[in-house]
Image (cartoon, coloured by chain):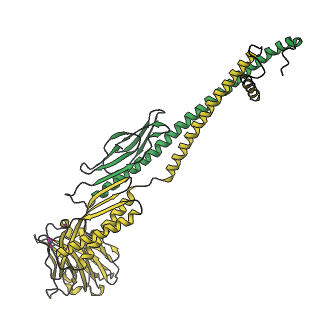
Amino acid sequence: MREPADSGGSRLRDDDRAVSVTVGYVLTLAIGAVLLSGIVIGIGGVVDSQTDRVVRGDLAVVGQTAVANLESADRLANASEVDRPDDADAPTVDVDVDLPDRIAGHPYRIAIDDDAVTLRVDSPDAITVIPHVATLPVESTSVRGGPIRIRYDGDAGRLEVTER
Amino acid sequence: MAAISSGSSDGDDSRGGGPRKRGSPSDDRRFRDADRGQLLLVAGLVVAVSLVALVVLLNASIYSENVATRGIEATDGEALEVRAAAVEGTGAVIDGTNRNRLADHDAAVTAVDDGITDLDASLARTYADRGGVTHVSTNTSSMERGSYVTGNLTANGTGGSNATLAADVSRTRGFVVEVDPDSLALTDESGATGNAFRVEFANDSAETRAVYVYEDNVDGNITVAVGENGGDPTVVCSASSVDPVAVDLTGGALGNERCPGLWAASAGELSGPYDVNIERTGAADGDAALTVLPDSGDSASSDHTATPAVYDARIEFSYRTAELRFETTVRVAPGEPDA
């Protein structure tokens, strides 16, 4: 494309071409920048939407795990009261559940009450409510997402959830 | 894009100290090339980081979906299984000890204690393989002492057709009467009071509940009916004849059929301690067995063979795994009705 720099007779032609090359470069840069921006924005959007999807999916899975173990503890607590003499020591039922500390890199909270387990992530804003069918009363509480312990309080006759 | 790539390599060449020198007319072009290279570099970096983030995210998603479809392993199944095994095993130890007819209550209590120690070792071995630690223990002072009564219905101490199986008892369990169906009276609901064999429960207030067993004179089925204070009985259940037919009064069964509510409708309605009597044994050929808890003392008086027995035992049960801790106390009295 380029001619030797010392070719004096062709300088004017060089100049003309320089203008066109400059415009061509600018155009190329502009189009390249637009294309790359599009790709970056597009991928950013995909990442965001996938993050949202993964967070919601993980919340559901983690919530179901928490609910399954809560109901498990409920069954054990009920079984611990079957044929238990009134003057015997209170039964012990502890169920440890290893839930992840973060969901798709975001911290979350677990709220438990009599009816459901609610998991919440603040950013992106997502809430999942999983109803449970534990027969015993469940103390309303909210804990950080992560390993939890579900305990049966035999004296109070209710289930409690604590961080571990 | 091909043009961009070649431009970029130009820029790299110039940066790498190629044949061109600083201050030459191509300096402007070189800087522009360098700018374009940076743009590509930064954009490529952003795209690469985004793709890595996407891959990590999708991996997390796939893992979650995997966990979701794998099913959540319930932690309680095995604990409840071990508890059931411990209760069943203790029940078998108690009943086995009682059937051995030991000489006195102390010997029976010691035998049950030893049996539970063996059961503990056996359960611990079995569930150690699965990663669980079990422990079953008992306290001899927690065992209630009673009597194990057995005998032929007709061959009782009175020599007559009426006899007392156990007097002044507060609880009864494992009460089964096994009779030859051919020996039963052939009658119906209204004739049962006058003709059929019956087991009568009578408390101190002269309240009675009688369980009649007879062969129905219409359909030939073995029939069980319950009467209140000597009145006409009400049929609770009936079953086709098998030989011999077992009437499980505490378990609520007639032969192979369920007979729900049999205990609740009979002795379960009485308050306070009661006597267990059998009457009109001429209309039933068979055996009876029951374990009773006397209202006072260790032994119940009986016209049949009553031997020292353990009525129930308390076991301290615990089961632990890495995720679970389950400890409780269970009172084991096999074959005791809920009522």
Q: Nearer the viewer, residue B146 or B176?
A: B146
Among the 4 quarters of the image, the one containing residue B267:
bottom left
In the image, taking residue B121 as reference, residue A39 lies left or right, namely right
Q: Indicate whether B152 appears above or below B324.
A: below
Image point (28%, 72%), residue name: B93
Q: Position of residue A28 (x, y in %)?
A: 73, 22
Q: Position of residue B66 (x, y in %)?
A: 53, 49
Q: What is the residue that sits farthest to the right in this orientation? A: A9
Drawing shade for chain B: yellow
Chain colored green? A
Q: Nearer the viewer, residue A52 or A90?
A: A90
Q: Nearer the viewer, residue B35 or B276?
A: B35
> What quarter of the picture does the C terminus of chain A occupy?
top left
Q: Magenta segment: does it hold B100?
A: no
Stretch of the chain drawn in magenta = B269-279
In the image, taking residue A5 as reference, residue B304 lies left or right, namely left
Q: Nearer the viewer, residue A9 or B49?
A: A9
Among the 4 quarters of the image, the one containing residue B163:
bottom left
Q: What is the residue that sits farthest to the left in this orientation? A: B205
Q: Is residue B189 visible?
A: no
Q: Magenta segment: does it hold B277?
A: yes
Q: Indicate whether B34 appears above or below B143.
A: above
Q: Position of residue A66 (x, y in %)?
A: 41, 47
Image point (36%, 54%), residue name: B324
Total marks in image:
0
In the image, taking residue A129 as reference, residue B235 lies left or right, namely left
Q: Is residue A69 visible?
A: yes
> What quarter of the picture does the N terminus of chain A occupy?
top right
Q: Indicate whether B298 appears above or below A104.
A: below
